[in-house]
Amino acid sequence: MNRVIEKHIRFVLEDDNEALSAGLIGDSDEENKRMNRALIKRHEGILAKLDDGETFSQADLQLIRDANEIHVNDGANLNGHHRQAVKLDRWLDHRMELDKDKAMQILEQWLDRDARTPARVYRALHTLWEEATPNDVVAEAAFDDDGRCLTCGSKVSFADVTDTVVFVGNEIVKRYDGDIASRNCVRCNHPKVYPEFEHYDEDGGSSVRANRHP
Ligand SMILES: [Zn+2]
């Protein structure tokens, strides 16, 4: 990885962690503090990946982009990192997956810049969009590579696993491991039972996925 990029990634994550840590002092509400702590941990995870030369997940890249945004927007360069931030932003553009919504948005924005863009170009774009998304259903991943919910970052999920078991009489004599048929974030979808599992998110929770077949 380019040294300037690497150095700047470290800077934005550490800088953001400092701000988040400052938010833990005082009497801001507990939910905010919990989210700050979770984000600090995720940033630390990304820094560790950087140390070990591991590749980033798409969710990691998004968090890097989020932390970098304040410096990209700092056009007056008051914090002294604007140039590096823009460079990192371009670097991220090459690595981050683009979903159809975002691709559409980017194309429309660029077409809007030219007042002479004919209406049929927009029509063509929308036709392609409709072809690409039959029934308006866009299948999107709900979890990142580390099994974290893309909405809230929690690692705890309920999954239905379709194992095939062989019964002899009432006794199971063989089990074929199946696939996950559906998987739902517990914090997002079952908030009432989430407190029971919350500690997995707090102490790293690396054993959660290993216990899929208890
Ligand atoms: Zn969630």
Image (spheres, rainbow, N blue to C red):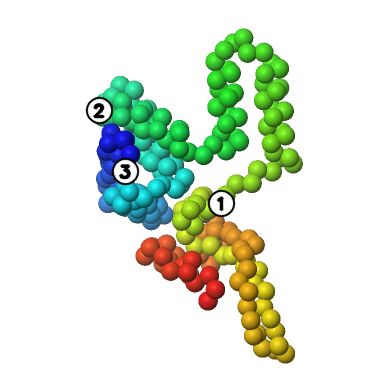
- Residue type at mark 2 is Gly
> Which of 168 and 136 lies nearest the eye of the viewer?
168
Instruction: Tell me if the residue at label 1 has its CB under 8 Å from ligand 1.
Output: no
- Residue type at mark 1 is Ala
Question: Who comes first in sequence, dot 3 or dot 2?
Answer: 3
The residue at 52%/59% (across/down) is 187
Q: Which residue is mark 1?
A: 142
Q: Which residue is mark 2?
A: 80
The residue at 71%/17% (across/down) is 120
Question: Who comes first in sequence, dot 1 or dot 3?
Answer: 3
Q: Position of residue 3 (x, y in %)?
A: 27, 36
Q: Which residue is mark 3?
A: 13
Quick one: label 1, few (<14), some, or many (20+) residues within 10 Å?
Answer: few
- Residue type at mark 3 is Leu
Q: Position of residue 32 (x, y in %)?
A: 39, 51
Q: Position of residue 185 (x, y in %)?
A: 54, 59
Q: In which quadrant of the rendered image does the N terminus lie?
A: top left
Q: Left or right of 137: which side holds 52?
A: left
Q: Left or right of 172: which side holds 20?
A: left
Q: Position of residue 180 (x, y in %)?
A: 61, 63
